Amino acid sequence: MLRFGLLGAGRIGYTHGLAIQNLSEACIDAVFDPVDEAAGRIVKLSGARQAGVEEIIADPSIDAVIIATPTNLHAGQIEMAARAGKAIFCEKPIDLDIDRVRACLEVVAETNAKLMVGFNRRFDPNFVEVRKQIDGGAIGEVEMVQITSRDPSPPPVSYIGVSGGLFRDMMIHDFDMARFLLGEEIVEVTATGSVLVDAAIGEAGDIDSAVATLKTASGKIAIISNSRRATYGYDQRVEVHGSNGLVSAENMRATTVTVANGQGYQTEPLLDFFMERYAVAYQAELAHFVKSVIDDGVVRPNGEDGLKALELADAALQSMRGGTMVRLG
């Protein structure tokens, strides 16, 4: 039985808590959250005890930690856990500062710690199948990837100021997905962005609408489209075009029922937000982490994947501000 300490019991922490409850090989032994009500939900869910971060990390009976605290705490808690010999699952990003991420990963390497970064979309059954079709040669050589990611509505402006901005907070998932689908490292980034949804987001120093174009050394291209507003629901699509064809994953709905009548064709609305859309992916990523720790296998996405996604986010921000293409590597 893999015993977890859960650091952070907010919305995403609770989601991970639910996932652990569905795994027979793991349990939550202790939980930390500065808000007693949030920690109490995990206690009620799992029977875990409340404890401080230092207490959880120092406890030799705890094998692994899930880090779901605010971003500015991630790197320090990863380092503490690595030095204590824990396996680590951390929500993205490791930090908003690229040099801080590199320093953290040096500690991970020195301690030989297992670190997995929470890019849950790699575990979505639809996107997994897209990658499987690519690997099986169904579309030949990948040439172009298109990723669409649009939220139903923008987050509170109070969140914008601590989020790191759209590229580091929202599009970072799509940068990782682009690497996952292209199968090659990206060497060029061109990005542009605007404030089209909420003027307050611009006043907070961010954008709410953006497009990024990525290119690999061999010439493969990925185009990412992001918006903080989609009036029709949570818009999540990918399309991969290859030398012999195309594979795509469309949006998900509560049911596949279509009603046709004199008014036209009517379908269910899209799923409302990421908690519903990626519920299966959250479960699958923690199942992968638990199995990898128990079997002493390789975990992916790892710290290096987290670093590369943040490098792409930083390059996109630099490109937008400078109005030019940014070359990596």
Image (tube, rainbow, N blue to C red):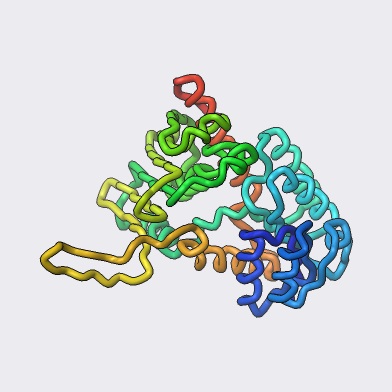
Percent position (x, y) of residue 304? 63, 45
Q: Place residue 197 in its image quadrant.
A: top left
Tell me which residue sits at (31%, 66%) in the image. 268
- In the displayed structure, would residue 240 be above or below residue 123? above
**Looking at this rendering, what residue extends furthest in the bottom direction?**
24
Horizontal arrangement in the rendering, residue 16 relative to residue 230 (left or right): right
The image quadrant that residue 85 belongs to is bottom right
In the rendered image, the residue lying farthest to the left is: 262
Is residue 70 something that shows in the picture? yes
Question: Which residue appears at 42% of the width and 47% of the height?
Answer: 150
Residue at horizontal 77 percent and vertical 73 percent from the top: 48
Q: Could you tell me residue 323's position as x and y percent?
A: 45, 20
From the viewer's perspective, is 63 left or right of 11?
A: right
Which x, y percent locates residue 1?
A: 74, 77
Q: Nearer the viewer, residue 226 or 114?
A: 226
Q: Taking 241 as reference, is 265 left or right?
A: left
Q: Residue at x 43, y 29 (%)?
A: 192
24 left or right, relative to 60: left
| Residue 2 in sight in this render | no
Please tell me whether residue 35 is drawn above or below residue 77 in the rendered image: below
Query: Which quadrant is the C terminus positioned in?
Result: top right
Residue 30's spot in the image, x, y percent? Answer: 79, 68
Name above or below for residue 189 compared with residue 251: above
